[in-house]
Amino acid sequence: MQILSAIPGVKCFKPEATFYLFPNVTELMRAKGLSDYDAFRKTVLQATGVSFCTRRHFGRPIPGEKELYIRLAYSGINTVDIEEGLAKFKAFAES
């Protein structure tokens, strides 16, 4: 949560207990000139090697839904790898 909170354009609600996070990336996508989830996902993967699912992988958006979310899963991944991936994601956001 600390790393995600430090990424420009990313907001994330802190859950009570889970191994998934759903950061809001609306501002980050806008800052990068991307409005399409798939283009954002592929751009981040190519630039950083970081992979994630988007909101669209989990059903259709609610009518009028304007916020854009990704899904980060961190079960079965050690802390060092999580921190490395988030650092790469942060560097992408700041570039």
Image (cartoon, rainbow, N blue to C red):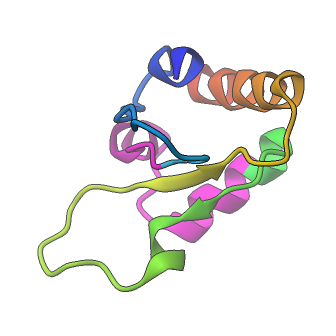
Compared with 77, 88 (above or below) is: above
Q: How many marks?
A: 0
Q: Position of residue 87 (x, y in %)?
A: 73, 21
**Which residue appears at 58% of the width and 56% of the height?**
40
Closer to us: 65 or 44? 65
**Which residue appears at 45% of the width and 19% of the height?**
5
**Which residue appears at 68% of the width and 32% of the height?**
89
Image quadrant where residue 80 sits: top right
**Which residue appears at 45% of the width and 67% of the height?**
55
Q: Give the left or right position of residue 44, taking residue 15 as reference.
A: right
Q: Quadrant of the C terminus?
A: top right
Give the farthest residue toward the bottom.
Answer: 60
Tell me which secondary structure the magenta stretch mostly adopts. Answer: helix
Give the farthest residue toward the front.
Answer: 17
Q: Give the left or right position of residue 88, taking residue 70 as reference.
A: right
Q: Position of residue 12 (x, y in %)?
A: 39, 34
Give the farthest residue toward the left.
Answer: 64
Closer to us: 86 or 29? 86
Image quadrant where residue 15 sits: top left
Q: Give the left or right position of residue 48, taking residue 95 as reference.
A: right
Residue range corresponding to the magenta coloring: 22-44
Q: Position of residue 81 (x, y in %)?
A: 87, 30
Q: Give the left or right position of residue 1, taking residue 85 as reference.
A: left
Q: Can residue 37 be found in the magenta stretch?
A: yes
Compared with 34, 23 (above or below) is: above
Q: Can residue 34 be found in the magenta stretch?
A: yes
Compared with 87, 48 (above or below) is: below
Q: Position of residue 58 (x, y in %)?
A: 48, 77
Compared with 37, 47 (above or below) is: above
